[in-house]
Image (spheres, rainbow, N blue to C red):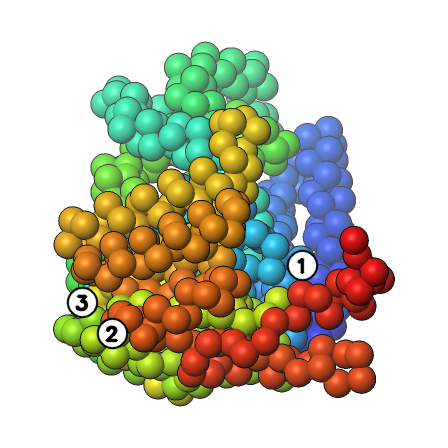
Amino acid sequence: MNTEFDLSDPDKKLETIRDKVLMLSFGRLGLFLLMLVLLVVGISEIHWLLILFFPVTFVFVSLILKFNKEKDRERFYQAVKEMNGNREKRKKRELKEFDTGSEFMESSHPFASDLDLFGEHSLFQMMNHTVSRGGKARLASWMKTPLDPKNASEKQQALFELSGKKDFLFVFEAFGKAFMKKDKAPDGKARFYAWLKNSQPWHSMYFLPMILGPIVGLVVLFGALYSVFSTLYLSIFILVGMGLLGFIFKPLMEAMKALPNDNDLKTLQAWAKLLEREQFENPLLIKHQTPVKQKDFLASKALKELESLTFLVENRTNMLYLIFNLLFWVDFYVLYRLKKWNQLAGQKMKQWEETFETWEALVSMAAFMEEENLTTQVKWEEKFTFIGKEIRHPLIDPGTCVANDFDLKENEKVVLLTGSNMSGKTTFMRTLGINLVLTGMGIPPFARSFSTGPFLLYTSMRNTDSLGESVSSFYAELARIKGVLEKASAGEPVFYLLDEILKGTNTADRVLGSEALIRQLAHSNAKGIISTHDIELSTLEEQLPFLVNYSFHHDIQKDEIVFDYTIKKGPCPNFNAQKLMELMGIKIENAG
């Protein structure tokens, strides 16, 4: 399949292609009617006209192939138009129409359920450019992988190179969107791989009908047409052929049920061709390119062969195929080609599919980097520090997003974050968390500069009741905190984000428990941020050298609460709960 496309002005390209498709449709219809005339008249009256049937059939098939090629081009440019529209929607953070990836949510995961990685208005919606079930799962698994500085650094260098290949990324995605619209269910793929493992029932005696069928068929056909001998011989030949074809009917039906559809194979072939042609310098990219680009074996050629075989097998019930099959016993040739293909390439198919799933995830991340112009090199520290300049949340419109600096020094272990309602505490914590997820994937963060240690990220933000498990939100929060303590006690370098700590209990117990937790965490190999409305806890800074206060403030202007969403050193000087209640109609002064 052709992988060279002009990406400029897809609307004009579509208009031209549709004109060609219309002309080819009329031409194909005219030739089909001519074939029927030649066949009917040739058999009944003017036998020599049947000689013309075969070259006309050849031209008809050529027109079908040309028509299919133009339809493929039409679908490609339609995908390009869709992608251009999607790019604008992502830019504006209009994500409602995109796949949420909600099936990858895990309430027990250390951080995935708290940081808007999946679900409505999520990072997955921003980043996902995959089209297959496996590619989507691969991307989701990388989003949930614990931070590994070595792997993240290697992947980031690979993504920097890949994100610079804009045409490659665009064409790779466009092929997937154009042809792999509906991914086969897992049981369909299992059936295909089971079929590959079972050797095709080809016997050496099948060579005889495969070779003799076309030769004897031509002799008997023309002999009967030109009255060299009786048409009875043609009838006998067809009956014998039906009997012989019956021996291989079952394996071909099994192949028809097991083979992937030709659109999926068209996509894989195009991806293989793109990868074979592209030149990479990064070792990680070369490693993932190698399975489809070997010196003595190109995946694109093998996949093209399988695509053509799939087309033949799927069209065995087509009238034209039935005619040729009865006259020339074509099924034997098709079964033989399937057998040979399986011997040469069948065992590589699983590896190719896994390779393409990896490339889908890599292309998604690189395209995300290119769209968001992410270029910040992460500096990995051996010390447990965290320093970021102008850190932004990727899901907030860049036009309104407020960037913040954050500096957690080596001797600082606990950040106590206070602030009024809606001032930005939770959003800031999620900003840090989601940027750590990005850096762990090898994607540059939304920041001007970013350096971090080898942390394991743990969060406790969205703890909800579970009626099915009889679990209260307070118990769910304690279970999350227990996980942080266990990892920290085991010596793991944990970076935690705990939002509105112990909010499910009374004030006295909450303050007492919070202080105990802060002291316990400080004596472990962990550091992080704890947000709270209990301003009393801010006085701990005077007692504990490892604790530092940060806060978000607000201002009241003409009965309106104004936020600047900028983090500041020190505890919050005032809160806004009373003012909010007053604005909602609750008259505090009259209470009691």
Whole-percent x and y of residue 566? Answer: 53, 82
Pointer 2 or 3: first along the chain = 3
- Residue drawn at x 28%, y 71% as measured from the top left: 543
Dot 2 amino acid type: Pro
Q: Are marks 1 and 3 in contact (CB under 8 Å)?
A: no
Identify the residue at image location x=42%, y=83%.
569
Q: Is residue 162 above or below residue 211?
A: below
Q: Nearer the viewer, mark 1 or mark 2?
A: 2
Going from N to C along the chain, the mark reached first, 1 or 2, is 1
**Proximity of marks 2 and 3: CB atoms separated by less than 8 Å:** no
Please tell me which residue lies in front, 51 or 392.
Answer: 392
Query: Of the numbered discs in the image, which one, if any, rests on residue 560?
Result: none
- Please tell me whether residue 55 is drawn above or below residue 152 in the rendered image: above
Residue 430 visible in the picture: no
Disc 1 element? loop
- Neighbor class of circle 1 (other Cα within 10 Å; few <14, some 14-19, many 20+) is some
Badge number at residue 96: 1
- Residue 191 relative to residue 24: left or right: left
Give, as a three-letter code, the residue at label 3: Lys
Q: Which mark is residue 150?
A: 3
Q: Residues within 10 Å of mark 3 (few under 14, many from 20)?
A: few
